[in-house]
Amino acid sequence: MLKFKPFIVLAAILFAVTLLIPSLLVLPFMEEKAGGKLGEELQSEAKDVAAVPTADSAVEVAVYRTALSKTEKLPLDEYLIGVVAAEMPAEFELEALKAQALSARTYYVKQMLSPNKVGVPEGAQLNDTEIHQVFKNKEELKKQWGVDYKWKIKKIAEAVKATDGQVLTYDGTPIDATFFSTSNGFTENSEEYWSNSLPYLRSVESPWDLESPKFRNQTVMKVAEVESKLGVKLPNSPEIGKVISRTSGNRVAKIDIGGKVLTGKEVREKLKLRSSDFTWELKGSNVVITTEGFGHGVGMSQYGANGMATEGKTYQDIVKHYYKGVEISEADSMLTKVTAKK
């Protein structure tokens, strides 16, 4: 047996080499194909996909930055990301963020098609405050969010992209897509807070808001301050005023205070209350005011939208609940008009 061992070893070596040589010859070509031309083609395709312009990215927005006293220009999709980020918590459900993005884009298009530009200097289309829509750019959001910036901006960008080029219309025209934080359980008819009666801004139930952390609030003010701001003399009794009527959304419509009749809106704005659904009582030299809801109450409730999304409703369901009789339309022709007017 010892005489045959060298031949067995040699045969094994030759057999192994025979198997390895084809693999060694093919491997460099496989690597070249995967990491060379084919890899370049895949990267090129990825770039082409990323480079496909969206309807929003083709429109330039000129937003006046009030704190800096200058106008900032950026694509519409970036502007909408900054609006949604400033107006709605990124922690909200994605479908709620989509509804907010759709409302924000509709507001912008409606503003651009309007001949009246209020609150902006020459060269700007809108400003970054509540007069139009609150806006923060990416640098401001990085400072605000810190380590949470990446996931928050990605989530909001996803919401904006999912609604790309869409607006809310009624009879083919962009609507006044108003929104607010939290209702008192109902939204408000537009004419019961503002002057215009709009068919899509009707009072609807919004029970999800009762779970909002902003649903109820209490404010304590000095009697003298209340009298000064409202221009009234408070009666010396626990019942400060008599509510004459309420709105469809169960907010104070009119109230008689010591013989002077004021609207709930007037009381809210003069005393800077969270809502026009309020009750109050006299306690010594103080007036204790309790409000339910946060905001004017007209249009889409943000916390209501989030509540609906939590229950599995889509952004289409949300906007059609809060804006009655509207359609979700492609804004191509409207955005073309916006671009042409610049």
Image (tube, rainbow, N blue to C red):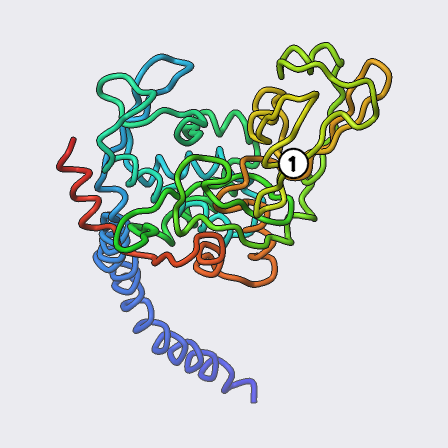
Depth order, front residue of 332/29: 332
Depth order, front residue of 275/328: 275
Counting labels gives: 1
Depth order, front residue of 181/224: 224
In the displayed structure image, the side of residue 214 where residue 44 appears, left or right: left
Quick one: which residue is furthest to the left in this view?
Answer: 340
Image point 39% across, 59% down: which residue?
325
Decide: few, some or many residues near mark 1? Use Cα within 10 Å; few <14, some 14-19, many ≥20.
Answer: few
Measured as percent of width and height from the top left, residue 240 is found at 76, 25
Measured as percent of width and height from the top left, residue 180 is found at 52, 39
Quick one: which residue is furthest to the right in this view?
Answer: 284
In the displayed structure image, the side of residue 321 where residue 200 appears, left or right: left
Q: Give the answer, above or below, for where 69 lies relative to 18.
A: above
Q: Please state, as top left, top right, bottom left or bottom right, where the N terminus lies in the image.
A: bottom right
Circle 1: residue type: Ile
Measured as percent of width and height from the top left, residue 115 is found at 22, 31
Q: What SS does tag 1 mark?
A: strand
Measured as percent of width and height from the top left, residue 196 is found at 39, 39
Q: Please state, as top left, top right, bottom left or bottom right, where the C terminus lies in the image.
A: top left
Image point 63% across, 36% down: which residue?
252
Image point 36% across, 50% down: which residue?
161
Q: Which residue is mark 1?
A: 244
Quick one: which residue is furthest to the bottom in this view?
Answer: 1
Depth order, front residue of 16/103: 103
